[in-house]
Amino acid sequence: MRRPLGLVLVGLGSFLLALAPLVRFYVTGQVVRAPLNFYQATELEARDAQYYDLLARKVRTGVTLAAANTVRGDTRANRGDDGIAVWDSITEIYDKDRRKQVEFQTYRIAFDRRTSELVNCCGSHVGGDTRVRMSGYGLLFPLGNVQRRDYPVFDMSTRRSLPMRFDGEERIHGLNAYRFVQQVPNYRTAKIDLRPTGEMLGLRGAADRRRTFKVDRYFSATITVWVDPRTGIPIKHDQNIRSTVETEDGRGKMVVAAARLVTVDRDQRRNVDTSNGYAFQRRLVESVLPIGGLAGGLVLLALGAFISMRAPKDGGTPRGGVTRKPDGRFGASGGPSGGPAAGGGSSGGGSSGGGPSGGGPAGGPAAGGPARSWRTPAPRPSGAGARRSGRS
């Protein structure tokens, strides 16, 4: 029984030793990837903000704005390329007090599931414009490999990649996050149909105050992101944005939006929980399972080898001292002279050796039992010899 058990343990140990590198180098690559079927709803809020109310044709100040952002993965948009994830983002900015929509933004990104770098495919767009060429990083930083350095991050408002600089570390709801800051300089984003008066644009001349002007829209921002370095998942956003319209000559200017949008505390905590879950999965497949498999395999291998070496070989003496003799019979483990069985000392009346009351050819009696003599019966006569014997 010992030998089969030892072989089973050796087999299990060898299996675990072979499985450990497979989990570390193959399974990890399958787990540490951005999901295809992703969904997340996040809210940002800005107090004491201002925006231009187009219907009322005036600037509203001291309002509370909210930005409701929804990100949803499109599992079929990658056209069967399992290495690419495609996510759609929709953001509605609205006046919380008046429940009135201020702005609506949409975009689609496609990116490498392992590196998080943007690629141009699968219908990626900004505001429906598929001619936009994206580069750098989008919604995620490098998965599980965020360094204390600058990263190029694509800005959807200006439609270009700008550096996001490492700015230190900070605790966010118990998580040690890396803080990155991106400066978006004042940049013309679009020509608009709005024709404000010179008075709205801050022009002082009497003639200019009554005129209307063609204007372009400009955007600037300071964007701060706190990222979990273990996963590359953003935990918190702080977007200090400013949008203006300006005349072509730059003399007139009007602020159409100014707000500091910050991820609400509820969603920060949820992002921490989500990131902790991904970090646990990564740690499990990168270290816990491979190291545990390696250690367990070595232990089982050593234990199996030890048990196999301790097991009796074929023809050896099993436990109890009974062995097979040259004539094929089983007897006590005494010598050829038929000495007493192991542990018996002298039999019954104390005789030792091969006497009638000792062991005899068939082996000695059981330890401590009464002395008995064993004799081989003489062969019975057969045939004519038997009949003659009967007559006599």
Image (cartoon, helix red, strand yellow):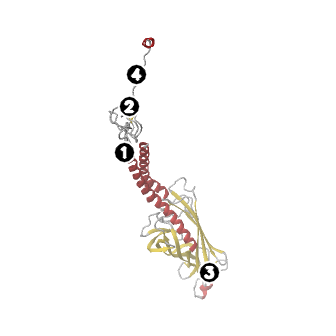
Residue 85: horizontal and vertical position, in percent?
53, 59
Taking depth in this image into account, of 216 and 29 the one nearest to the observer is 29
Picture layout, residue 335 above or below residue 203? above
Q: Amino acid at mark 3?
A: Val
> Are discs 1 and 4 less than 8 Å apart at CB?
no
Q: Mark 3 or mark 2, which is nearer the start of the sequence?
A: 3
Residue visible at 60% across and 88% down?
206
Q: Which residue is mark 1?
A: 309
Q: Nearer the viewer, mark 4 or mark 3?
A: 4
Q: Nearer the viewer, mark 2 or mark 3?
A: 2
Q: Which residue is mark 2?
A: 362
Q: Amino acid at mark 1?
A: Met
Q: Amino acid at mark 2?
A: Ala
Taking depth in this image into account, of 169 and 223 the one nearest to the observer is 169
Q: Which mark is residue 118?
A: none
Residue 170: horizontal and vertical position, in percent?
47, 74
Direction from residue 51 to residue 356 in the image, left or right: left
Question: Which element type, helix, strand or loop, lies under badge 2?
Answer: loop
Report crowding for label 3: few under 14, some 14 to 19, many 20 or more residues within 10 A (C-alpha): some
Residue visible at 66% across and 75% down?
100
Q: Mark 4 or mark 1, which is nearer the start of the sequence?
A: 1
Question: Which element type, helix, strand or loop, lies under badge 3?
Answer: strand
Q: Which residue is mark 3?
A: 63
